[in-house]
Image: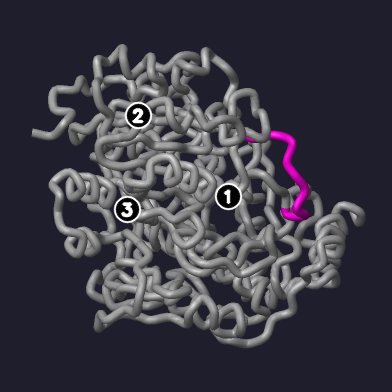
Amino acid sequence: MTSGEGLHAAEMIPTSVKEVKALGWDWIDIIIFTGDAFVDHPSFGTAVIARYLQKAGYRVAVVPQPNWRDDLRDFRKLGAPRLYFGVNAGAMDSMVNHYTASKRLRSDDAYTPGGKAGQRPDYAVTVYTKILKEIYPEIPVVIGGIEASLRRLTHYDYWKDDLMPSVLVGSGADWLCYGMGERPMLELTRAIEAGRNMSDIRKIPQFAFFMSGKCRDKDVLELHSYEECRRDRKAFAENFHLIETHANMLHPSVIIEPVGDGYVRVNPPYPPATQQEMDSFWDLPFTKLPHPRYKGKHIPAYEMIKFSINTHRGCFGGCNFCTIAAHQGKFIQSRSEESVLKEVRALRDLPDFAGNISDLGAPTANMYGMKGRNGDLCAKCVRKSCLFPRPCRNLDRSHSRLLALYAKVGAVKGIRHSYIGSGIRYDLFLDESGYVDESSYPYFRELVLEHTSGRLKVAPEHTEDKVLKLMAKPSFRLFMRLRDEFDRIVSESGRHCGLVPYFISGHPGCTIHDMERLSRNPALKGLYMDQVQDFTPTPMTASSVMFYSGYDPSTMQKVFVERDIERKRRQKSFFFKKK
């Protein structure tokens, strides 16, 4: 019998001593510290892990946004858990949350009640873990979420402008769970509870940990050490190419990275979740509301997603500046139609729901249900992207299943609109010669006319092919084709709908002259143009490796990098000045 057997399925996740006492608990199995406000919604990882472990019978409490500046009473108030502490920085890396691309402090925080800034520390995972280790040195600490996941090995930190070792080294955490954590966290929890020996626990997939001494294991991928990477930027780029290659393989190796007097070991991940497993991750008693402790206070990030539905995980686009595949994986893991429809029907019971789904999507909305035609070829593949430099011939790009899902969602009583707020990949339904299959035009037409709220946002990212190549994005000619098709659909329908392209300035390889050519490109005339984002190097992306090392890790060729913040700002502002 697990410790929490007999818990009511919809029982509250407590966040205070008062709430723990109200539940009649005399112990807690797991206490999770997070940098975000606690929102019991499947778009927030803390809620997903808490509910998933609760469903397995464990007593889980959450301490949101603990005060790290005072006498640390927030870290002491619930005492020590029976099994371990969990720590995450929240839904974003704390440094991305705090600072702009020009390293200016942001004035607000979307994941905090009232949007108030300053409610979490810089490098929150490290700060929280060190405090817990000082107060409770005998209790294991498991770190996870975006910040820990993408800092699991040597990484470039833009805000310190320095190369940093794995977050395991600086934080002193016992375990690091990377990626989407339901299955690994449940197995670790059961292993700790059962008292399994340490050598056995260290074999659990999707965990990283630090060990002293030299690795004696065979059949592992050993990288250049952290110290070598500090001495030689090319070694860091070589490391990343191997890390990224294995992160996109179905059967990767154990990765070993020496650092100091030991090494970080990263176990391979779990296989992609099956449809049944994906459904189980959403079949949890989420209230889909902020915790009652906030008493109706406005939490901006929650307001953006409260009526959204996530259909799948993963992305095989392979953009060099993106971390989705590094965290969620390359292989698409889709929910069943019935699982999605069950969540859609439940939206009708939420306060203020007026029948409009704000986003029926995922990291890339139109990858739902997509996979290789021949799974055996996918199992052997080492390509980072199924779309770049050209779409894989084994990839089934049919949008038929997605169109069928849209139709079923639209048929649910009480649903007026289901908008697609997530990004789409137009190279999934369009190439320079036209639509790719019989489902492509019906999909794009329905997307524009039925699922777009005034403006369709797409991301060509740049106009210059040499920059797009370093981004791993298709030629701008494809966007020009997309605009032609978009204009034709809108004109024939008589609807009023705009096309909004997104661009990135300051990416490795991009010069001020490239931004000048972008701003003057005649194909952009007449479009709504204010979506230019300055490139921010974030941990565990190929683009950040280029920014730091000056090498393209996939080719080891040198790349121009604009590192001066003022000149980066000029790249971003140049376009607006011209307009």
Q: Amino acid at mark 3?
A: Gln
**Colour pattern:** one colour
Q: From the top left corner, tell me how far across and down residue 404 is, in percent.
A: 33, 43
Q: Amino acid at mark 1?
A: Tyr
Q: Secondary structure at mark 2?
A: strand
User: Pointer 2 and pointer 3: residues touching (CB < 8 Å)?
Assistant: no
Q: Which residue is mark 1?
A: 123
From the viewer's perspective, is residue 405 above or below residue 389? above
Q: Which residue is mark 3?
A: 333
Q: Secondary structure at mark 3?
A: strand
Q: Nearer the viewer, residue 348 or 528?
A: 348
Q: Nearer the viewer, residue 133 or 161?
A: 133
Residue at point 51%, 69% (across, down): 154
Q: From the top left corner, tell me how far across and down residue 275 is, in percent.
A: 24, 48
Q: Is residue 258 left or right of residue 202?
A: right
Q: Which residues are magenta?
A: 101-109
Q: Is residue 540 left or right of residue 49?
A: right
Name the disc covering residue 222, or none.
Answer: none
Q: Name the quarter where the N terminus is drawn.
A: top left
Q: Which residue is mark 2?
A: 61
Q: From the top left corner, tell me how far across and down residue 314 is, in percent.
A: 40, 55
Category of crowding for the residue at label 3, using alpha-carbon neighbours closer than 10 angstroms: few (below 14), some (14–19), many (at least 20): many
Separation of disc 1 and disc 2 at Cα? 22 Å
Residue at point 70%, 67% (across, down): 507
Give the quadrant of residue 349: top left
Q: Secondary structure at mark 1?
A: loop
**Looking at the image, can residue 412 be seen?**
no
Q: Residue furthest left?
A: 1
Main SS of the magenta part reads loop
Label whose residue precedes the other's in the sequence (2 or 3): 2
